[in-house]
Image (cartoon, rainbow, N blue to C red):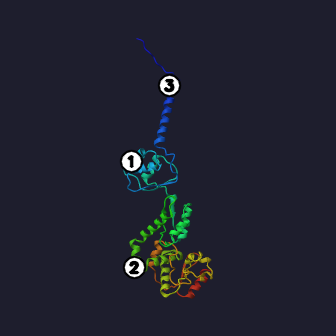
Amino acid sequence: MRTFNFRLHPKKIIFFCIVIAGLIVLSSWIFYTISFRAPKTFPETAVIVVPPGSSLSQIALDLEKEHIIRSPFWFTNFVLFLKQERGVVGGEYYFEKPMSVYQIARRVSTGDYNNDQLKTTIPEGVPVSDISLILKKNYPLFDTIHFLTIAQNKEGYLFPDTYYLGYHPSPEKVLGVLTETFEKKIAQEEIQTAITSFGRPLHEVLTMASILEGEARQTRTRQIVAGILWERIKRGIPLQVDAAFRYVNGKTTKELTMSDLKIDSPYNTYVYKGLPPTPISNPGLDSILAAVTPIQTEYIYFLTDNDGNMHYAVTLDEHVKNKNKYLK
């Protein structure tokens, strides 16, 4: 019987192995590109909202529709692998640059929002005009003129806090979020009880609180100053607070002149008795509580020295002495 002995030349074996390896690499690359790699149309600097309680399959389809992932199948399986069927964490996710489907799955399954750079902090005691400047700094495309228009009657009713407003928030969205937060904060039982017990309308409370933001820094000093100012109102004595001049001519205490104190404006509490017609800023809870929990003292006058320390006086002569001693 004739036998055939097939023997491949070593060079052919090497060539064959190289071809096989190349095909494996090419197939792997194609598979990765089709399944795992971010889409070419990935929307950079995008904010994707994952509604809490949404089904995993719906989220996968939504992400594919938004060009965040290529394969809903692999996204779903990676999430199940990472979270063991516990699903994804709802919220706003910021994607600065394209990511693989595995990276996307890991982020939404662990709540890695990456939205710190979308964080906006509104300090306590800033007026609406300053809020618009803060928003403009964080969001260059923000329409400050429109915001000031729709928020013109909201001074005092926009709660100072840290917010995650998403990417390019509209003025309406910002106003809605800040107003809603204020309403939730003011509705807290402790706050409501204190305001109701004090007996003053909320508008007056907020106006006083906004003054306290500008005149005092600590809780106790705010309460003492509140006691002084409510007493001055009771006696018919002008409040004579410098903080209100931000609504008159924008000047601070150190910038005021004697002629400034004579400006005819309802916000000039040297000229007009009682509270200004509206809050002069947006106060935090500490000042709101201080406004309705004043500490009663014998003092009628107060001033803050250059180091931020508060000095009180019972008589005008004592107040003048404090001025000469601490402000010169």
- For label 3, the SS is helix
- For label 1, the SS is helix
Front position among marks 3 and 2? 2
State the quadrant of the N terminus.
top left
For label 1, the crowd category at 10 Å Cα-Cα, with few meaning under 14, some 14 to 19 and many 20 or more, is some
For label 2, the residue is 197
Rounded to the nearest angstrom, the CA distance separating label 2 from label 1 is 53 Å
**What residue is at 55 percent from the left and 78 percent from the top?**
244
**What residue is at 56 percent from the left and 86 percent from the top?**
318
Front position among marks 3 and 1? 1
For label 3, the crowd category at 10 Å Cα-Cα, with few meaning under 14, some 14 to 19 and many 20 or more, is few
Disc 3 + disc 2, Cβ < 8 Å: no
Name which of mark 3 and mark 1 comes first in the sequence: 3
Can you give x and y, in whole percent of width and height, for residue 202 in the image?
44, 77
Query: Which residue is outermost to the left?
Result: 85
State the quadrant of the C terminus.
bottom right
Residue 191 location, quadrant: bottom left
**What kind of residue is marked 2?**
Ser
**What residue is at 42 percent from the left and 44 percent from the top?**
74
Disc 3 + disc 1, Cβ < 8 Å: no
Residue 306 location, quadrant: bottom right
Can you give x and y, in whole percent of width and height, for residue 78 in the image?
41, 46
